[in-house]
């Protein structure tokens, strides 16, 4: 029997190392699959995430960018249960509801994961009572941007009625609940353009190096925080002592910071107006 030759360092031939690496990677994938199969709670969360992505008609790139922004990972299979819960919170903020268990897609729900057929996505033009905006992903984004404008000191009235009036002016549609995705996009871009002109918000993507690879992701909350920080520094506010703003660890922390900085911006402008 002829033994395989080894290199001077005593390592196995390259072919052997490659095969061993392949076996290791396969074992890792199998172990991950085993963990998922053995954990009903994790399986349920993953099922809801995939359902939410389908219902919100989120593209592959947008979905991966959202995972990157929230968890620094680009695959839900790599996430811990707390990270999966964070992704579900973000999906609900964007308008996702899970009617299978009657609790709006709760991360801790026990709804079926594999054997239950996902219901069809809601119609793009969903009705809403009175003059309110329909509950949808684009309506949630419009509300989020409108409130960002309030916290930047640009929007004077943060109410739903004021947002509806703005949307009507942009779309020339009297029944705002019948505004479709195309018209909603025009409203969203109009608000973003307004906040850029009046508050200097930069909506461009971020670029980072992850694992030696260059990735692009979006973080509109952080962009709003950066604009708020610049406004406060221009006011000479003590709340913005450094050139760079903090970077919150979660969406909830970012929202809380945006509200706090927004209150300080409004106070500063009111004081300036009185002076």
Image: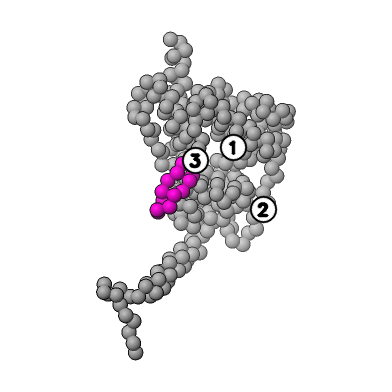
Magenta stretch: includes residue 211: yes
Residue name at image x 46 percent, y 63 percent: 32
Q: Nearer the viewer, mark 1 or mark 2?
A: 1
User: What is the secondary structure assignment of the residue under circle 2?
Assistant: loop
Pick whichever, 105 or 238, lies toward us: 238
Relative to 194, residue 52 above or below: below
Q: Earlier in the sequence, mark 1 or mark 3?
A: 1
How far is the residue under mark 1 from the one under mark 3?
20 Å
Pick whichever, 177 or 210, lies toward us: 210
How far is the residue under mark 3 from the one under mark 2?
33 Å
Q: Are marks 3 and 2 in contact (CB under 8 Å)?
A: no
Residue name at image x 45 percent, y 32 percent: 225
Relative to 61, residue 10 above or below: below
Residues shaded magenta: 205-217
Give residue 205's mark: 3
User: What is the secondary structure assignment of the residue under circle 1?
Assistant: helix
The C terminus sits in image quarter: top left
The residue that disc 2 covers is: 119
Give residue 140's mark: 1
User: What is the secondary structure assignment of the residue under circle 3?
Assistant: loop
Magenta stretch: includes residue 215: yes
């Amino acid at each position: 029997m002829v033994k395989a030759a080894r290199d001077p360092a005593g390592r196995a031939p390259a072919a052997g190392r490659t095969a061993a690496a392949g076996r290791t990677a396969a074992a890792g994938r199998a172990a991950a699959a085993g963990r998922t199969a053995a954990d009903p709670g994790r399986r349920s969360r993953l099922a809801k995430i995939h359902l939410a992505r389908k219902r919100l008609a989120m593209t592959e790139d947008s979905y991966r960018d959202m995972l990157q922004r929230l968890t620094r990972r680009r695959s839900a299979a790599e996430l811990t249960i707390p990270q999966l819960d964070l992704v579900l919170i973000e999906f609900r903020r964007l308008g996702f509801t899970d009617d299978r268990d009657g609790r709006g897609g709760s991360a801790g729900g026990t709804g079926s994961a594999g054997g239950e057929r996902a219901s069809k996505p809601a119609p793009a033009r969903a009705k809403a009572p009175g003059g309110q905006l329909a509950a949808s992903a684009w309506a949630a984004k419009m509300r989020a941007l409108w409130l960002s404008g309030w916290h930047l000191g640009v929007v004077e009235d943060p109410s739903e009625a004021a947002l509806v009036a703005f949307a009507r002016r942009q779309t020339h549609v009297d029944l705002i609940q019948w505004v479709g995705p195309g018209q909603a996009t025009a409203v969203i871009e109009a608000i973003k353009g307004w906040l850029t002109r009046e508050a200097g918000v930069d909506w461009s993507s971020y670029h980072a190096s992850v694992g030696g690879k260059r990735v692009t992701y979006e973080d509109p909350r952080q962009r709003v925080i950066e604009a708020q920080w610049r406004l406060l520094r221009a006011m000479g506010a003590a709340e913005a002592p450094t050139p760079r703003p903090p970077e919150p660890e979660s969406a909830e922390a970012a929202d809380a910071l945006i509200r706090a900085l927004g209150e300080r911006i409004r106070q500063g402008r009111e004081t300036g107006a009185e002076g």
